[in-house]
Amino acid sequence: MKFTNEFCGRFYFAFDMNGDGLTTISDIWMLFKNLFLIPSKAIAELIAHLPKLASFFEMDCWTGDGGGGAIFSALVWFVIFVTTVDAVQNSSRN
Ligand SMILES: [Ca+2]
């Protein structure tokens, strides 16, 4: 099984996300969802390039898109937020 960006489209971003020729509220939702899931999709993409690990985790193109990916991404965004706030507070003290 081969995983590539072109095949899975993990990092596809467009105003017409579902390719129906129109930009609607559904496209905006899909765009925000894809942006939010960047951390889980990035990890999935990295693992997909390691065939033995990818087969161990039974990966497919939807890996990183589900609830687990959302929880992982939320944790990563939280760590980024806390780290950024801490850095800003430290820089304002000095
Ligand atoms: Ca559309």
Image: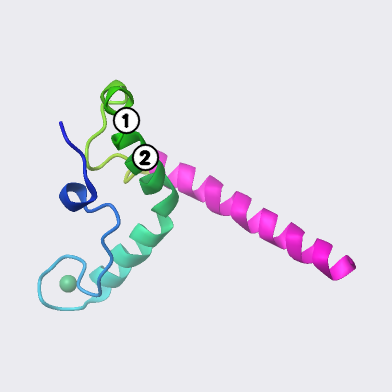
Picture layout, residue 45 above or below residue 22? above
User: What range of the chain is rendered magenta?
Assistant: 68-94
Q: Residues within 10 Å of mark 2 (few under 14, many from 20)?
A: few
* Residue at 21 percent of width and 67 percent of height: 17
* Residue at 30 percent of width and 57 percent of height: 11
Residue 33: within the magenta? no
Instruction: Answer left or right for 77 relative to 69.
Output: right
Q: Secondary structure at mark 1?
A: loop
The image shows residue 72 at horizontal and vertical percentages of 47, 42
Residue furthest right as drawn: 94
Q: Residues within 10 Å of mark 1 (few under 14, many from 20)?
A: few
- Coloration of the structure image: rainbow
Residue 13, quarter of the rendered image: bottom left
Label 1 sits on residue: 50
* Residue at 33 percent of width and 43 percent of height: 45
Q: Secondary structure at mark 2?
A: helix
Along the line of sight, the residue nearer the viewer: 74 or 93 = 93
The image shows residue 88 at horizontal and vertical percentages of 75, 66
Counting labels gives 2
* Magenta part, dominant SS: helix
Q: Amino acid at mark 1?
A: Leu
Q: Amino acid at mark 2?
A: Leu
Picture layout, residue 39 above or below residue 29? above
Picture layout, residue 57 above or below residue 73? above
* Residue 46 - label: 2
